[in-house]
Amino acid sequence: MIPTRLGPRPLASTAAADLGVARGGTTDRGGTVGQITDSRVTDGGIGGDRRVIRLLIADDDALVRAGLRILVGGSADIEVVAEAEDGAKAVTASDAYRPDVILMDIRMPGVDGLAATRRIRSRARAPQVIVLTTFGADEYVLEALRSGASGFLLKDTAPLEILSAVRSVAAGAAILSPMFIRRLIDHVADPQASSRRARARSRLTALTERENEVAIHVGHGHSNAEIATLLRMGLPTVKGHVSRLLSKLDLNNRVQIALLVHDAELL
């Protein structure tokens, strides 16, 4: 059962310091820490001019959740609509409150963030997921992205970069940072690269020549607009190719396209 909204309560200001957020902020979006909480927002945004991004925070650390709420509280275009203290509650909250984006911790009791991400991303009209964690090990990064996450951030990421990442994935982009590209390159150089390369290339045989070209540019981290310029195509045509890539390859997002292209060693 999803707990109903409780009355307003102040948040611990120490949490802001943990995430590099300026102290002094509070929020009235309430709810008991450690439970799924809800704050409904409208699609009209500020003054009805723009849509507010609905955000779910999933983390077993109450101070981290509080710090993120303080951070988001200073943004006019992002609203925390729910919190969850473990992966199972994150799945339930995602179904109940239909967020646009989820900030998902990895290590949580019971159902962890990776399993929760797989469950959430398997649903129709699934929200985008950004994994936000203290663990930057390669196996976590790759597993998170293969699970359908649109990005991977460490908890020491600058606050403004976290907000920027939320906005980017809400708009349909993926977070392909230089660090991520470097890890992909290292990933394809490991001892199991040969078998992964064969599997990846076999999957890519379903694509047309043009779709392969688009996939390679996605692997380089190029945006749709950049691909349109480089391949001299219209932007709607590029978007159509990307949609077909996701459908043909049974993938969730651009990051997974990039992983497949890297596995195939086409870059």
Image: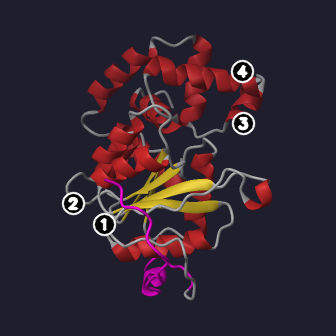
The mark nearer the N terminus, 4 or 3, is: 3
- Residue at the spot of label 2: 109
* Residue numbers of the magenta segment: 1-22
Identify residue for label 4.
237
* Sequence-earlier tag: 3 or 2: 2
Q: Nearer the viewer, residue 215 or 48?
A: 48
Q: Is residue 234 magenta?
A: no
Mark drawn on residue 226: 3
Q: Foreground mark, 4 or 2? A: 2
Q: Give the CA separation, mark 4 to mark 2.
A: 44 Å
Label at residue 175: none
Check disc 3 and report its element: helix, strand or loop: helix
Q: Are marks 1 and 2 in contact (CB under 8 Å)?
A: yes
Instruction: Say which residue label 1 marks.
Output: 60
* Label 3: how many Cα within 10 Å (few below 14, some 14–19, many 20+): some
Question: Spatial distance from mark 1 to mark 2, Cα to Cα?
Answer: 7 Å
**CA gap, disc 4 and disc 1:** 43 Å
- Callout in the foreground (4, 3): 4
Identify the secondary structure beneath mark 1. loop
Amino acid type, mark 3: Glu
Q: CA distance from mark 3 to mark 2?
A: 42 Å
Splitting the image into 4 quarters, where does residue 37 fall? bottom left
